[in-house]
Image: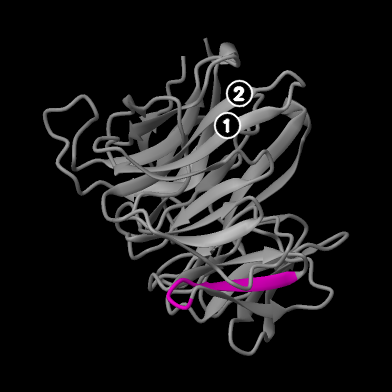
Amino acid sequence: MLRNSLIFIILILFFFSCGDDSGTNNGNSDSLWIYYNFRPDNDQPFVIERMDLQTGKRYEIIDSAELASLPVNNRLIFKRYDEEEDSQGHKTGTNQLWVSAADGKNRQLLIEKEYDQNQFEAWMLNDGNTAVLLSNKELSVIGIDDGSEEKISNTPSYLNIHYMAIAPDGSGGAFFSNNCLYIVDHEAKTLREIDIPDCNLDSFFSYDQQGKNIIGKINGNETNTLVKINLESADIDTIGTGKSFNRPYLLANGEIIFNELEPNAQYRNYFYNVWVIKPGSTVPQILSPKEGNGYRHIYHKEFVGNDEILLGKIRPYSAHYYDKIYACNIYTGELRFLCDVNLI
């Protein structure tokens, strides 16, 4: 039953499958997929599943694993943990980074590291051949094809990376840590630091299509500010302000999509709205209908159909689980039903 299950939808992990899965138990190769970690019960390890958004069917593709990053070029990277406890109750063992096809086949171990209880994270770059790995307080560049590892020489002594935005040209990524914005250059194996004084930038942001700016939000005491930051000059331009901008995401056509939440007395929880800011405007327009617990934008790189993005309808009395998934026209707000999210 749902109450005995734990599911984490990885909101940025969407993928138009290009592999040949026809005739397998992993779904149709022409489908649009959502990938996520699923734990059948609290005392069991995570498995990786994917859901066909055309049919709503779920497929377990990798057992005892957690997704590391979104699939690129029909490949995904995932994490496994070989953990043990010593006589003192301290965890030992190894952290492992693996690569597979997007359907979970052809799995290969890339890197095995000494167990790190703090952070073991990896992000695949848009070239599909390179990943950035954070392990034991060190950043390194991993070659997906050969499992090679080269350390990033000027990694700061302390990093706390919650999210890394990936450059559209595959050259690297960007993350925010300790009041600094860092740009990863995977070819030079270095970090470029952009100092943004007194800037409480939220850890989730996205590149523009040219890779020259990022779109993000600066957290304030009473209001949040939606901003564009130039990655060369560090100039900050204000796009708009609001009480609870959440996870702004820049679409290919220049529209900025973000979630906003407000108290919802009916469900003793929060109500989720999805808004859009059109190019050249600073005035947000609401997209999602006000019903139930509301909707959240589900992040992906491309439109689902003509000018459509993915929205998840929040399950009643919940803040994290989806009930249904829709395609939403960013100009008209019209919803097109895709599938039920069946988690029983």
Q: Are marks 1 and 2 in contact (CB under 8 Å)?
A: yes
- Residue farthest along the left direction in this orientation: 23
Establish if 139 lies above or below 112. Answer: below
Is residue 15 shown left or right of residue 150? left
Is residue 221 shown left or right of residue 72? right
Establish if 56 lies above or below 240. Answer: above
Q: Nearer the viewer, residue 168 or 170?
A: 170
* Distance Cα–Cα, label 1 vs label 2: 6 Å
| Mark nearer the N terminus (1 vs 2) | 2
Q: Which residue is mark 1?
A: 93
Q: Secondary structure at mark 1?
A: strand
Residue in view at x 39 percent, y 70 percent: 170
In magenta stretch: residue 183:
yes
Q: Which residue is mark 2?
A: 84
Query: How crowded is the residue under tag 2: few (<14 C-alpha within 10 Å), some, or many (20+)?
Result: few
Q: Amino acid at mark 2?
A: Glu
Q: Position of residue 43 (x, y in %)?
A: 59, 14
- Residue 68 appears in the rendering: yes
The residues colored magenta run 180-188
- Residue 248 appears in the rendering: no
Q: Position of residue 110 (x, y in %)?
A: 38, 47
Q: Quadrant of residue 292?
A: top right
Q: Secondary structure at mark 2?
A: strand
Please tell me whether the stretch drawn in magenta is mainly helix, strand or loop. strand
Establish if 108 lies above or below 212. Answer: above
Is residue 55 shown left or right of residue 234? left
Residue in view at x 55 percent, y 79 percent: 213
Tally the numbered discs: 2
Q: Position of residue 173 (x, y in %)?
A: 51, 68
Q: Amino acid at mark 1?
A: Gly
Residue in view at x 30 percent, y 53 percent: 305
Q: Nearer the viewer, residue 187 or 242?
A: 187
